[in-house]
Amino acid sequence: MALMEESTVDIVIALQTAISQLNEVHTLGELLRSITGAYPIERSFILKLLLHSLPSLQCNSPLISQVESFLNSDNTNVEIVDIHTIFNEEVPKIIQHCTSLETEEKKSICDSIIESVNINAISYEFDDLQQPFESFFKSLVYRLNSEFRRFELTDELLNCIKDSKSSSLNLLNWIDGFYEPLKRLNSIIDTSYTLLDYEKLHSVDENIQLMTAEIEKGHDNNIIREILIPYFAYIGPDAWESFNTWLMRFGLKISSEKDTNAAKYNVLRNLLDNDDLLRHLDKQASAVKVKFTKYILSTIFLSPDTNLEFFLVSKEILVLLNSLKLEDGEPFDITSINTKSFQDVSRCFEASHAAISSLIGVIEVGEILYSNKLSLIDIVKLESSEKTIQKEQLIKYISTEIGYDTKYGKCQLFLSSIYSTLRKTNVFNKISNEELNEVILQKMLEMKQFQIISQVFGKECTQLENEKFNNLVLKQCWALYNNASNCDPKIGSLRECVECLQLLDENLSKVKRLNALIKANERIFEWKFYFEPKVPITPKRVLQCNNPLLIIRRILELNDDAYLYAGDLYYLVVLLIDGFDVVEQSPLFKHKHKSFDDESNLLVYKIKLLCLEVASVLDYNYSFQTAFALVSNASLYKFEIEGLFDLVSENWFTFFQLSKNEYEGISDLKALNDKLKLLGQVLLIAPTEYNSNVLEQWQMLRSHKSQLIQSQELEIQSKLRHKNVNLSLGDVQSRLQKSLKSSADELLNTNGTEIGKSIVGWIVGAN
């Protein structure tokens, strides 16, 4: 409102006051009629003022007719009105008081009202470009919903709005496609949101994630019809893009889980079993349908499930999918898919009826061979390789015959019978003796018969090359390692991994690596350690971390006294570097061959820096001793030890933070002196751009120190007067001045001369 005539100011103040104190809606009608055509108050501002100031209890269905009358009234005759016209000469006292203020004061009040009204309008999505009726009531619903956080309180109002002749198609679509679906969604999700949350804080993708999260639970099949479809119809193509993104993530998740329950595929079946959804999907652009179809096909194709229930559900899904209007497509060779990446598989598939039919054919084979526990990928591979089929059948045969008898004679007899079978039959004519030995070894490894392998297998199965033997055993070792449920190598799968590893030459590099990793797990087991609360750490999780320093940091975080054992932590990090095989990951790791006491070992410095980060809030003496030593060495050996200065400089904030920490049981003056001394040294190693931060903290602490000494001076004077000690104030001041001088000399002593010069020089340069 680019206006500030005094009469206009009075009207704005009067209107805001009157509207905010309305007790009955019909009174609002009289008020609105009195200002219809009032110059120069715009109607849009009146609506915004109503949105801002109208009491919530008056925001009910009768309000609709009042607003309609106001908007439909003749607005062509403009006349300048004053507050006496509005209130029929009976101006309420509170308004008389407000309008009797000085002009500038009234203008200030008016400006505040206008600013507040406009901010409020923006916050509740008031859109001047929309039809006034639509914009006002949408914003009013947002406001009421935000105030009461209950959708039911605006249901009656919206029902009346839907019956109003003033309601635009956009407003009706908003109610049916936004308000109603999200009200329904809000009633079933765990966390309650407001309508504005769904509009402003949540993206379309986030809203759809909330919907699909409920769909995944499978508790309410009406979600698709009552929430998903109307919301999609309102949002348009963007909703389908977000939905396809979820479909990809969902498919990736359930197709990568080893123990996927076939019931999870009922989520897809329920989606496709909804005719309204399919009809709506058929109306979308071709690219949307293509993505949707490919993601469904990929999810089924990559499933690790091998049970009959999965095959039946998947076939039903594909039959429903086939009802979409897709291209017929050329005959699709599903054996051409030779990848297990979800994205790659989705690119390989065609969104055609031919591709769907091809996958249905594979599923039908799975239904026949379901007892073999073969996934669809396995079936595709089997169909393309006779030798693979023979090998799988051979493994089944061995699984039946081998048994669990670990006696030497029984195992020797078994091996002889296997070779005899191989010679007498053509079933395994494409399987060589070496491949047979490999299958036998694999089965024995799976059964964890390590002693039998050591005693019998090496003598009877001599046609297996050392490299193949080593690789098979190592593979089993890694399988046992990754399957271990805890980090103790004395029990469980990790103990079996140790036993299996003993079958190999300990001097092999791959054996050394795994041995180092096992020892690292044993060391970790000695500490309290986890990545997530209530989730026990496992060797596999340790390996997945692949970051030695992250593990050290986590140990320090979880164990209060761990920083006191830097040597043990160093030994652990060396084991982790070898176990993770990450020596090339960081220049620091190349120092792992050095001893802990080697002054040039940057890896030790890094460990100490990590210890300092944790100890800085726990142990005053340790922290400052370590900090002084690290900063001192960084400066002292700046040119002698390559990389040391940069390493310490990169961690300048760790030292800087020490100056901000508060410590119990430490003399304030001692703490201040140590902090000032440390900050002086930090100035020498901190990056130039942070010198101002360090100096500012240094100056603040200097000020604190001066205040502390002044406080002590006053305390001493008080005690002296109390005890009637005949000491002159001049003597006390003299001693305190000497104390101040001594403290200053201590900061700028011989060892700290350069610090003082740096500070002074920096200040001069800055000025």
Image (tube, rainbow, N blue to C red):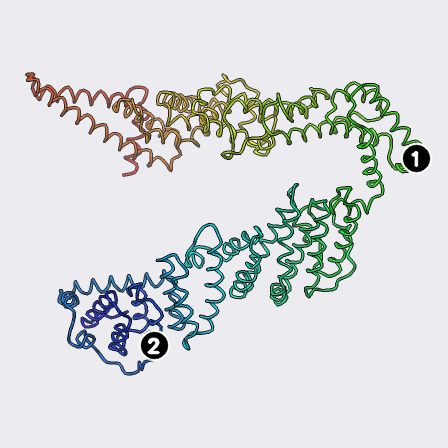
Q: Quadrant of residue 691?
A: top left
Vertical side of 64 occupied by 727: above or below:
above
The structure residue drawn at horizontal position 84% and vertical position 30%, both measured from the top left corner, is 434
Q: Label 1 sits on what residue type?
A: Thr
Distance from the alpha carbon under mark 1 to that under mark 2: 95 Å
The secondary element bearing badge 1 is classed as: loop
The structure residue drawn at horizontal position 74% and vertical position 22%, both measured from the top left corner, is 450
Name the quarter where the N terminus is drawn.
bottom left
Crowd band around label 1 with a 10 angstrom C-alpha radius: few (<14), some (14–19), many (20+): few
The secondary element bearing badge 2 is classed as: helix
Q: Label 2 sits on what residue type?
A: Leu
Provide residue 481's location: percent of width, then percent of height: 64, 29
Of the numbered discs 1 and 2, the one sitting upstream in the chain is 2
Q: Quadrant of residue 767?
A: top left
Tag 1 and tag 2, C-beta contact below 8 Å = no
Q: Which residue is mark 1?
A: 425
Q: Quadrant of residue 160?
A: bottom left
Please give the label number shown on residue 71. Answer: 2
Provide residue 4's location: percent of width, then percent of height: 22, 69
Q: Nearer the viewer, residue 50 or 664?
A: 50
Vertical side of 186 occupied by 75: above or below:
below
Provide residue 435's location: percent of width, then percent of height: 83, 32
Crowd band around label 2 with a 10 angstrom C-alpha radius: few (<14), some (14–19), many (20+): some
